[in-house]
Image (tube, grey):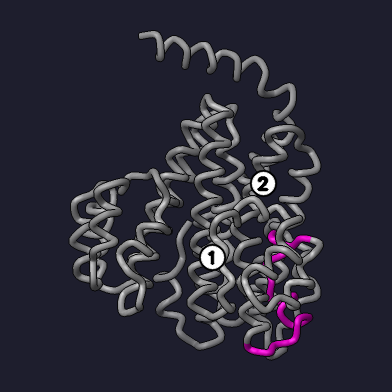
């Protein structure tokens, strides 16, 4: 009763006020979404004999001039191709953020955080292996760059990393309580990555809750799925490691479709079979895994990516909300993964497998 009428009142407010501030950015975004590669494009690309054909076809799509300087005969053509496609995504995202203000600007900034987390871990991990900072910076995802990135190389333990560099970056607030004086090792870095992801998902969820309305409704579905995906990923990756049940539980978000009982069972699961057994009790994972005949870890990741794409498409069926910005980013990233897969299959002369890895 009262809750439903409050929701209707908020929906009415969204319809009247959303376009004042955010309508232009959303209109541009829906234009970008219309330019995503479609089934016709993929059908043609899957028939390409070589990378020259692929580049030529992509030149007729929205990628157009972005690929003009890709050297098709070079040794690292695939890398160049993917870099250019990523540049296009970054240009679009930056343009959207320039058109945004207030809560939408903050929302788009939060969409960048996963890439920032991965970049920080990449650089610190690379420095542990004595790699050159400039080489590592080249490998970073451009959506997750921030000013102090290059200074990450100076840290020798977790606290230095925080006090010298991260405290003044957008990641600063996610570090409280998760630092120790331990030296930086691969294991500690992976735990740190998962702690940061957990803090970010919970923070993003709180932000969307506060925003309310359709944004909260759509993003609650996305972030609940993201929370579950992290829990599944942590469980799979910790098989055979020294992580205790409590360690694993401390890395899980405090919400999501698997919270609390599924997470508790996942923390106790000792091997792949037990993890699958836990997931078989929860929708939609039971249906997805039975359809896919998931018998290996990689398959589970594929299945979850496919499910996320369906959520992204559904987000566009509603209007006046921020969820479409997150959905578009995810769809574009999947498109770039598709192009990577197609390019690799062509290079390795495995044309028969091209269709296996393409999702749209």
Q: How many marks?
A: 2
Using the numbered discs, state the Cα–Cα distance from disc 2 to disc 1 in whole angstroms: 31 Å
Stretch of the chain drawn in magenta? 129-146
Which residue is painted at 62% across and 70% down in the image?
158
Q: Secondary structure at mark 1?
A: helix
Is residue 306 visible to the viewer in this orientation of the structure? no
Task: State the residue position of label 2.
Answer: 32
Label 2 neighbour load within 10 Å: few <14, some 14-19, many 20+? some
From the viewer's perspective, tell me whether residue 108 is left or right of residue 348.
right
Q: Is residue 140 magenta?
A: yes
Question: Mark 1 or mark 2, which is nearer the start of the sequence?
Answer: 2
Residue 345 sits above or below residue 30 on the image: below
**Quadrant in the picture for residue 1:** top left
Task: State the residue position of label 1.
Answer: 193
Residue 208 placed where, x, y %?
Answer: 55, 35
Residue 346 placed where, x, y %?
Answer: 54, 82
Judged from this view, the residue extending furthest toward the front is: 181
Picture disc at residue 143: none
Q: Secondary structure at mark 2?
A: helix
Is residue 12 visible to the viewer in this orientation of the structure? yes
Which residue is painted at 55% across and 38% down in the image?
323
**Quadrant in the picture for residue 274:** bottom left
Which residue is painted at 40% across and 9% down in the image?
2
Label 1 neighbour load within 10 Å: few <14, some 14-19, many 20+? some
**Quadrant in the picture for residue 235:** bottom left
């Amino acid at each position: 009763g009262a809750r439903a009428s409050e929701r209707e009142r908020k929906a009415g407010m969204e319809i009247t006020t959303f376009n004042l501030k955010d309508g232009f950015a959303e209109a541009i975004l829906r234009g970008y979404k219309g330019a995503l590669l479609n089934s016709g494009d993929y059908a043609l690309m899957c028939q390409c004999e070589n990378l020259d054909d692929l580049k030529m076809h992509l030149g007729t799509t929205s990628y157009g001039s972005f690929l003009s300087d890709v050297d098709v005969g070079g040794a690292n053509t695939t890398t160049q191709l993917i870099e250019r496609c990523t540049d296009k995504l970054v240009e679009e995202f930056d343009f959207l953020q320039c058109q945004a203000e207030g809560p939408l600007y903050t929302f788009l900034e939060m969409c960048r955080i996963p890439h920032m987390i991965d970049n920080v871990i990449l650089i610190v991990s690379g420095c542990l292996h004595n790699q050159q900072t400039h080489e590592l910076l080249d490998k970073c995802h451009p959506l997750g760059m921030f000013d102090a990135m290059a200074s990450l190389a100076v840290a020798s333990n977790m606290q230095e990393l925080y006090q010298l560099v991260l405290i003044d970056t957008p990641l600063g607030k996610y570090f409280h309580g998760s630092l120790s004086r331990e030296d930086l090792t691969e294991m500690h870095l992976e735990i740190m990555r998962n702690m940061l992801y957990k803090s970010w998902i919970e923070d993003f969820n709180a932000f969307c809750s506060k925003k309310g309305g359709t944004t909260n409704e759509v993003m609650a579905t996305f972030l609940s799925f993201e929370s579950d995906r992290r829990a599944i990923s942590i469980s799979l990756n910790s098989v055979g490691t020294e992580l205790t049940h409590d360690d694993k539980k401390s890395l899980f978000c405090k919400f999501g479709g698997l919270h609390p009982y599924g997470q508790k069972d996942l923390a106790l699961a000792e091997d792949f079979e037990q993890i699958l057994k836990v997931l078989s009790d929860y929708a939609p994972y039971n249906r997805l895994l039975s359809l896919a005949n998931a018998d290996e870890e990689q398959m589970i990741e594929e299945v979850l990516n496919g499910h996320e794409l369906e959520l992204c498409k559904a987000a566009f069926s509603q209007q006046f909300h921020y969820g479409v910005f997150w959905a578009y980013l995810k769809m574009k990233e999947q498109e770039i993964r598709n192009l990577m897969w197609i390019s690799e299959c062509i290079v390795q002369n495995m044309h028969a497998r091209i269709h296996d890895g393409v999702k749209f």
